[in-house]
């Protein structure tokens, strides 16, 4: 029997922050604001995985008011979510995610993101799909003030 879960996250961009998506640092004049490194892709993936395993959301496991997670690398939190899933006898069948960003251009970084995510979850890269799109200039994402991500996870 397979289980599916969805995840979504959005964070504002700000100067003096490092931009990290899918565990990959990307050169950009702004980065994502968050209690952790603000990695919206990793956050959406964690919520999708936790949802598929019926384990709640990332706020339950890694609360934003807990100083232990201040500045945390989200890909390390993703690694911990992978361990939680394996402890319950589940495995990742597939992940599919879309990052929505007006800038920067993400295509050159997609393969590195897929490898980093796969390594964090101890799965084959062939089980990880990452895509990128813009918001055609619409809303907070389209104005370049935020980046969002959507994800779906299938567990076996």
Image: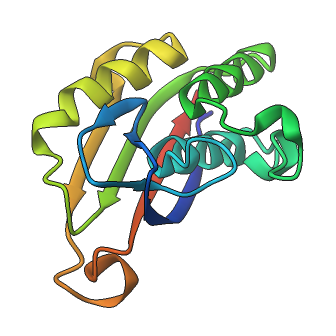
Is residue 35 rendered to the left or right of residue 10? right
Is residue 10 rendered to the left or right of residue 133? right
Q: Quadrant of the C terminus?
A: top right
155 vs 104, nearest the viewer: 104
Q: Residue at x 86, y 48 (%)?
A: 60
Instruction: Tell me how many marks there are.
Output: 0
Residue 15 in view (yes/no):
yes
The quarter holding residue 22 reads top left
Relative to 139, say whether 31 is above or below. above
Relative to 20, say whether 117 is above or below. above
Q: Position of residue 49 (x, y in %)?
A: 62, 39
Is residue 156 rendered to the left or right of residue 122? right
Q: Quadrant of the N terminus?
A: top right
Query: Colour scheme in the image?
Result: rainbow
Q: Position of residue 16 (x, y in %)?
A: 44, 51
Q: Position of residue 8 (x, y in %)?
A: 54, 61
The quarter holding residue 117 reads top left
Q: Residue at x 59, y 20 (%)?
A: 91
């Amino acid at each position: 029997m397979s289980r599916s879960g969805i995840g979504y996250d959005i964070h504002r961009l700000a100067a003096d922050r490092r931009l990290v998506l899918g565990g990959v640092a990307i050169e950009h004049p702004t980065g994502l604001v968050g209690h952790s490194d603000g990695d919206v892709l990793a956050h959406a993936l964690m919520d999708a995985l936790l949802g598929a395993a019926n384990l709640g959301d990332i706020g339950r496991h890694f609360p934003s008011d807990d100083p232990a997670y201040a500045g945390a690398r989200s890909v390390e939190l993703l690694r911990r979510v992978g361990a939680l899933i394996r402890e319950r006898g589940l495995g990742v069948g597939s992940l599919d995610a879309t990052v929505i960003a007006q800038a920067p251009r993400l295509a050159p970084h997609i393969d590195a993101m897929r490898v980093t995510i796969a390594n964090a979850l101890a799965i084959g890269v062939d089980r990880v799909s990452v895509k990128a799109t813009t918001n055609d200039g619409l809303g907070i994402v389209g104005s370049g003030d935020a980046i969002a991500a959507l994800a779906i996870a299938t567990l076996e």
